[in-house]
């Protein structure tokens, strides 16, 4: 099996949390990851969406419970290294945790408005589109995506040969931008390096998977 499931940590009952299975961003997330369907108009509309949410993002989402799935993924997923790239960092609510663990963290986002509300100054911020990461090949030990679209070819290109991609949905299936671990594996395994495998679990309200090349 390409994905091995670990026991959940402090799972929170699903009722009320997994409320948006038909959210429009779900279909966008799938078509970006599995069909590479990302055009300038879509990039602009996603940027506009998050520009509009930027001023209230942190106020309504900054909590230790929300960070728990990332902490669990990094720990039980055995994620180590020096350099981490966080794509779709938003207002950097998860970047703080990464800065405590990695020597260099770059936090990037499509929305300049989201980055302008960053809650930390510890990481360099980069306003760019993750469909074309402005980095050389093999540069990152870890690429972290929390509630963020997956661009598999670019993740594969920029991740070092032994690197890990960390995929976190802070509200599991209730997260608008969500893929199952199997969908993440299928998307990554469609890239140039072939098969990816890894671990997955749930923690608190969220779910995660950590994948590496086989
Ligand atoms: C749901 S928010 C998550 C923000 C943050 N990770 C969090 O969970 O608090 C998704 C973020 O991904 C960013 N994003 C979406 N598409 C992107 C792209 N193509 N390149 C870079 N960032 C993107 C958005 O601007 C937004 O800030």
Image: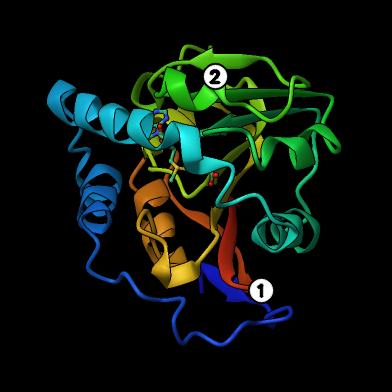
Is residue 34 found left or right of 185 in the rendered image? left
Q: Is mark 1 within 8 Å of ligand 1?
A: no
Is residue 64 found left or right of 21 in the rendered image? right
Identify residue for label 2: 116
The residue sitting at 38% across, 43% down in the picture is 149
Instruction: Report helix, strand or loop for mark 2.
Output: helix
Give coordinates of residue 93: x percent, y percent. 65, 41
The answer to which of 122 and 144 lies nearer the viewer is 122
Which label's residue is closer to the chain start, 2 or 1? 2
Mark whose residue sits in front, 2 or 1: 2
The answer to which of 214 and 123 lies nearer the viewer is 123
Residue 33 against residue 104 in the figure, above or below:
below
Q: Are marks 2 and 1 in contact (CB under 8 Å)?
A: no
Q: Is mark 2 within 8 Å of ligand 1?
A: no
The residue sitting at 35% across, 50% down in the picture is 187
Instruction: Tell me, for residue 97, which label it has, or none.
Output: none
Identify residue for label 1: 204
- Quadrant position of residue 18: bottom left
Crowding near pointer 1: few (<14 within 10 Å), some, many (20+)? Answer: many
Instruction: Report helix, strand or loop for mark 1.
Output: loop
Crowding near pointer 2: few (<14 within 10 Å), some, many (20+)? Answer: some
Is residue 190 found left or right of 210 in the rendered image? left
The residue sitting at 37% across, 19% down in the picture is 132
The answer to which of 150 and 174 lies nearer the viewer is 174
Question: CA separation, marks 2 and 1?
Answer: 29 Å
Give coordinates of residue 206: x percent, y percent. 57, 68
Residue 213 against residue 75 in the figure, above or below:
above
């Amino acid at each position: 099996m390409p994905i091995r499931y670990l026991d959940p940590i402090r799972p929170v009952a699903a009722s009320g949390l997994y409320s948006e299975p038909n959210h429009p961003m779900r279909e966008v997330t799938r078509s970006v990851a599995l069909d590479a369907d990302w055009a300038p108009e879509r990039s602009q509309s996603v940027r506009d969406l998050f520009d509009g949410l930027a001023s209230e993002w942190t106020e309504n989402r900054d909590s230790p419970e929300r960070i728990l799935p990332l902490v669990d993924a990094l720990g039980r997923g055995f994620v180590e290294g020096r350099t981490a790239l966080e794509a779709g960092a938003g207002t950097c609510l998860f970047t703080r945790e990464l800065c405590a663990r990695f020597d260099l963290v770059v936090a990037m986002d499509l929305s300049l408005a989201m980055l302008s509300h960053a809650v930390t100054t510890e990481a360099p911020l980069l306003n760019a589109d993750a469909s074309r990461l402005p980095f050389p090949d093999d540069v990152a030990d870890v690429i972290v995506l929390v509630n963020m679209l997956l661009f598999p070819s670019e993740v594969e290109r920029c991740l070092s040969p032994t690197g890990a991609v960390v995929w976190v949905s802070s509200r599991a299936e209730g997260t608008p931008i969500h893929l199952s671990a199997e969908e993440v594996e299928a998307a990554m395994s469609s890239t140039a390096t072939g098969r990816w495998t890894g671990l997955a679990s749930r923690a608190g309200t969220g779910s995660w998977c950590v994948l590496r090349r086989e």
